[in-house]
């Protein structure tokens, strides 16, 4: 096939060297980068006093102990619905931001963007800006190129190790783990996790970059379904910019300046783009809406003495409006509309429900599981015995004694397997599982009825706090 | 469309695949090269994997792989590791008085948890997953024990079994079939007396006659008042629990034909620590003495 030689099925990556740019969006992105990186690196080192028996790390995912600590909140495995609720809120938040501002997550807060930005910063500090990097790429391998490359890669590797290293601190006591890591006495899984995350950070941030967004991430494919004609995305006012042309030629009068658009084809917007596209071609799947082309173009427009905003945050509906000569509408009218308000309300509702659930949960927590194999046991004196697995959770930082009682029938007596009394001491932050027997003597209503509704009560002997759980008692069903 | 008639899209400058859906043509955009290399990498990895691990099916079994890995081997390793880890706890269950073992001792928890697993594997077939037994298979949750419910009694029963021919120390007793000894009327009278012992409805006149037969034939093992005798595994008759049913017809059948169960000697299958574990598990199910 002769055509096969003309077009390869597989193409090498085109290296992209985004030029440094200054402006309001660049400043905003520096701020967000500093904030997100600081949160990521510092959080595991924050301390929070929970009492002697509990860890004092403010944010800790204790996988072995099956606890999640978040400042004053402690989540047990059976309360995983809090995490599910937070994930639902994160999903709704993504819907909200995408319908209002398109891929704003991709452009500003996505770790891939933040770390790539950081790696680009390092790259510019070592190898210089776009033009110097291009020259270095074409230069033959020599001492200087080797030195620059090695320095850059070493710094990237350092950042990558710190990134992978910070991750594991969320899963163990950070100061202890840090000294363990340094003295090579930490668990192998800690090292392998750091190794994997170091490798992914180094490769994805240093070399894969926009390839991750274009080929690996599903989000660019989903976003189109959530955007509409009022969604603000980075776009080019081609009705103002076209026909484009070099400024000098226009001034020289080769074509009448009034027929030329504002775009002088200086390629500033293309040169700063971290995904290597031309925003003037219209909305594209590759665009992560980082808004750096807005900064680049605004800079040029200011120098030319023309109004800013040739490249700007625009909605699709702005094009027809502005082409018709109508005045642009303010951004808040794009953002505040039925759809975004509805998303906000649902999002807030989830949040309120979660906070409510968090505040009404009792500090005593117990579950009752009736043993139903067999449903009841007949004892030699004819009494009927039911058995229950009762799980008592002490969520306090110190041991507590709980008193267990049953209400609902005067016939029924309660006892705990292996214990003389109906009191039990549960250690701090632990669960105690007890087999509890209810006994109804022969001839009583509870023994004879098929089913008697009852309630287990647990009282904290220290605070007097009482909690109940409903259950029932199975009898012989003869009456 | 023929392969040599490739068409190039004007806007992108990319070839089309030649596929046309209502005027929409698919671009033949080249894939990234690293993607291709990743694919090659996975193929090489896959080939290496099938050499290193069991993979290719043969007529009998499959290739075993250079690393000698097997899931059964991994399971055995896990079991061995678990046993080694708990060897200290298991050792503390052997040759001691189990009654002395405190309930908050780790060895006690180990025994009860392990005993539950042994029970499910070895005992639940007859005694039920919930240990509630069935007709002819004793309920292990109640306070009625044929051969005794202390830790020592239970351990002996588990180790040697009942009425089996593999262990000379098995618990042994046999009730005669009274169908060959007593007349039908005499059996019917005896049944009425047994019903009276457990406080059930009965014919008082027949029971009085039955009391004589009971004293002659049954009391030697079951006791004068039907209180049973554990040395012989003779059940209590004056309580609310009956292994083979306490209706008139059940009792008639039992007295006429005699019924008793058989239990294997688990000393042949379980080691000392396992017997101790299952004993402690059974003892804390609600009926232990």
Image (cartoon, coloured by chain):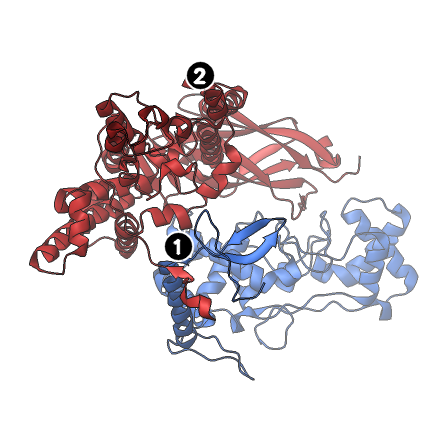
Chain colours: A red, B blue
How far apart marks 1 and 2 lie (CA) works out to 76 Å
Q: Position of residue A94 (x, y in %)?
A: 45, 32
Quadrant hosting residue A102: top left
Tell me, yes or no, if residue A190 can be seen here. no
B101 and B90: which one is in front?
B90
Residue contact between numbered discs 1 and 2, judged by CB atoms under 8 Å: no
Q: Secondary structure at mark 2?
A: loop
Chain ID at mark 2: A
A370 vs B264, nearest the viewer: A370
Q: Are marks 1 and 2 on the same chain?
A: no
Q: Which residue is mark 1?
A: B107
Give the crowd class for mark 1: few <14, some 14-19, many >=20 residues within 10 Å. Answer: many
Q: Residue at x 37, y 43 (%)?
A: A65
Residue located beneath label 2 in the image: A329
Residue B152 rendering spot, x and y as whole percentages: 50, 59
User: Closest to the observer: A263 or A220?
Assistant: A263
| Residue B282 on image: x %, y % | 55, 55
In depth, the one of B53 and A399 nearer the eye is: B53
In the picture, measured across the screen, residue A361 lies left or right of residue B287, that is: left
């Amino acid at each position: 096939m002769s055509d096969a030689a003309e077009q390869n099925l597989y193409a090498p990556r085109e290296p992209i060297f985004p030029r440094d740019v200054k402006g309001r969006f660049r400043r905003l992105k520096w701020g967000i980068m500093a904030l997100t990186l600081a949160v990521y690196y510092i959080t595991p080192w924050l301390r929070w006093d929970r009492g002697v028996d509990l860890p004092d790390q403010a944010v800790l995912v204790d996988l072995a102990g099956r606890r999640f600590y978040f400042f004053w909140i402690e989540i047990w495995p059976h309360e995983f619905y809090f995490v599910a609720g937070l994930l639902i809120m994160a999903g709704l938040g993504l819907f909200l931001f995408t319908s209002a501002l398109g891929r704003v997550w991709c452009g500003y807060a996505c770790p891939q963007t933040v770390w790539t930005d950081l790696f680009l910063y390092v790259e510019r500090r070592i190898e210089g800006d776009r033009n110097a990097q291009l020259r270095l790429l074409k230069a033959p391998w020599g001492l200087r190129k080797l030195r620059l490359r090695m320095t850059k890669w070493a710094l990237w590797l350092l950042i990558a190790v710190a990134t992978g290293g910070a991750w594991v601190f969320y899963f163990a006591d950070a100061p202890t783990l840090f000294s363990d890591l340094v003295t090579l006495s930490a668990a192998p899984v800690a090292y392998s996790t750091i190794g994997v995350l170091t490798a992914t950070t180094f490769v994805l941030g240093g070399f894969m970059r926009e390839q991750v967004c274009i080929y690996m991430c599903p989000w660019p494919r989903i976003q189109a379904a959530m955007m509409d004609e009022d969604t603000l995305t980075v776009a080019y006012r081609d009705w103002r910019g076209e026909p484009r042309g070099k400024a000098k030629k226009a001034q020289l009068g080769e074509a009448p300046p009034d027929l030329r658009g504002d775009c002088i084809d200086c390629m500033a917007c293309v040169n700063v783009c971290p995904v290597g596209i031309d925003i003037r071609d219209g909305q594209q799947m590759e665009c992560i809406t980082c808004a750096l082309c807005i900064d680049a173009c605004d800079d040029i427009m200011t120098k030319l003495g023309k109004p800013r905003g040739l490249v700007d945050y625009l909605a699709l509906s702005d094009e027809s409006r502005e082409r018709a000569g109508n005045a642009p509408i303010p951004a808040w009218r794009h953002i505040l509309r039925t759809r975004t308000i509805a998303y906000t309300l649902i999002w807030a509702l989830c949040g309120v429900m979660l906070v409510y659930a968090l505040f009404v949960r009792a500090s005593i927590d117990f579950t009752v599981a009736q043993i139903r194999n067999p449903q009841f046991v007949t004892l030699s004196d004819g009494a009927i015995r039911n058995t229950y697995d009762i799980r008592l959770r002490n969520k306090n930082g110190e041991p507590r004694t709980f008193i267990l009682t049953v209400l609902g029938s005067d016939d029924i007596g309660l006892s705990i397997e292996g214990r003389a009394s109906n009191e039990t001491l549960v250690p701090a932050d632990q669960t105690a599982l007890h087999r509890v027997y209810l006994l109804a003597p022969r001839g009583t209503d509870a023994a004879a009825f098929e089913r008697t509704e009852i309630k287990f009560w647990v009282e904290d002997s220290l605070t007097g706090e009482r909690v109940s759980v409903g259950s029932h008692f199975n009898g012989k069903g003869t009456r | 469309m023929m392969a040599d008639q490739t068409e190039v899209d004007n806007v992108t400058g990319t070839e089309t695949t030649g596929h046309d859906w209502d005027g929409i043509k698919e671009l033949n955009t080249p894939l990234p090269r690293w993607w291709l290399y990743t694919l090659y990498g996975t193929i090489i990895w896959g080939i290496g994997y099938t050499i290193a691990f069991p993979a290719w099916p043969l007529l009998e079994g499959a290739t075993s792989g250079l690393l000698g890995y097997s899931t059964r081997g991994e399971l055995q390793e896990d079991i061995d590791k678990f046993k080694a880890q708990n060897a200290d706890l298991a050792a503390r269950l052997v040759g001691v008085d189990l009654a002395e073992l405190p309930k908050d001792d780790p060895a006690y928890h180990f025994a009860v948890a392990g005993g539950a697993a042994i029970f499910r594997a070895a005992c639940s077939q007859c005694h039920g997953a919930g240990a509630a037994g069935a007709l002819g298979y004793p309920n292990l949750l109640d306070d009625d024990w044929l051969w005794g419910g202390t830790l020592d009694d239970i351990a002996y029963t588990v180790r040697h079994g009942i009425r089996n021919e593999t262990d000379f120390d098995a618990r042994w007793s046999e009730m005669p079939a009274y169908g060959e000894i007593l007349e039908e009327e005499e059996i019917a009278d005896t049944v009425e007396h047994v019903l009276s012992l457990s406080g059930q409805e009965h014919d008082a006149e027949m029971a009085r006659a039955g009391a004589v037969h009971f004293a002659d034939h049954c009391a030697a093992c079951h006791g004068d008042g039907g209180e049973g005798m554990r040395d012989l595994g003779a059940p209590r008759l004056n309580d609310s629990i009956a292994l083979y049913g306490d209706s008139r017809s059940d009792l008639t059948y039992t007295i006429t034909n005699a019924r008793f169960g058989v239990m294997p000697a688990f000393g042949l299958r379980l080691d000392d620590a396992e017997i101790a574990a299952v004993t402690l598990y059974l003892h804390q199910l609600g009926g232990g003495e």
